[in-house]
């Protein structure tokens, strides 16, 4: 069972349930992949809400590896979700949300165990990776490319 308070999510890829988590090592991997000098720069990039397919492959791959799965980005690129491309976008947004923003934990969702992101008030979370403020949790930050 995943622990959203620790930043873990569960996703179905290729018909199998996987745990994903962006550990500190996974975040360092993403800083390098996106040529960001620091975590605020990475957050700034993600907060723009415009991620390419390649970005999602990198984020999901880092999340899978952060959870201990030995999978390459090339393997992630060939995976499928029940909801197609929209499924990848939803999984990526959920992973970013639990890592940097709203946790959607069982207390907030009334103990239903639902993976649907929830605000602290128990309402469905807004789209995008950050909480209701729409701002990343760290001010400032350098820009990055990638």
Image (tube, helix red, strand yellow):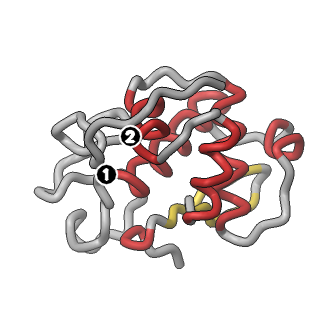
Q: Residues within 10 Å of mark 1 (few under 14, many from 20)?
A: many
Residue 25 or residue 18, whichever sits in front = 25
Furthest-left residue in view?
Answer: 121
Marks 1 and 2: CB-CB under 8 Å? yes
Residue carrying label 2: 129
Would you name the residue on which mark 1 appears? 101
Residue beneath the point at 50% across and 51% down = 95
Camera-side residue of 142 and 9: 142
Secondary structure of the residue carrying numbered label 1: loop
In the rendered image of this protein, does residue 139 appear above or below residue 110?
above
12 sits to left or right of 50:
right
Residue shown at 37%/52% (left/top)? 100
Q: In this view, does 7 lie to the left or right of 136?
A: right
Label 1 to label 2: alpha-carbon separation:
7 Å
Q: Neighbour class for label 2 at 10 Å: few (<14), some, many (≥20)?
A: many
Q: Quadrant location of residue 17?
A: bottom right
In-front residue for pair 7/111: 7
């Amino acid at each position: 069972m995943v622990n959203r308070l620790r930043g873990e999510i569960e996703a179905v890829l290729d018909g199998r349930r996987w745990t994903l988590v962006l550990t500190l090592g996974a975040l360092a991997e993403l800083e390098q992949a996106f040529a960001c000098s620091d975590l605020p720069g990475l957050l700034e990039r993600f907060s723009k809400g415009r991620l390419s397919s390649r970005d999602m492959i990198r984020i999901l791959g880092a999340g899978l590896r952060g959870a201990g799965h030995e999978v390459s980005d090339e393997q992630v690129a060939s995976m499928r979700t029940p909801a197609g491309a929209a499924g990848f976008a939803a999984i990526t947004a959920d992973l970013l949300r639990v890592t940097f923003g709203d946790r959607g934990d069982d207390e907030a969702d009334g103990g239903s165990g639902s993976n649907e992101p929830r605000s602290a008030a128990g309402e469905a979370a807004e789209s995008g990776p950050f909480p209701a403020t729409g701002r990343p949790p760290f001010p400032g930050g350098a820009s990055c490319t990638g």
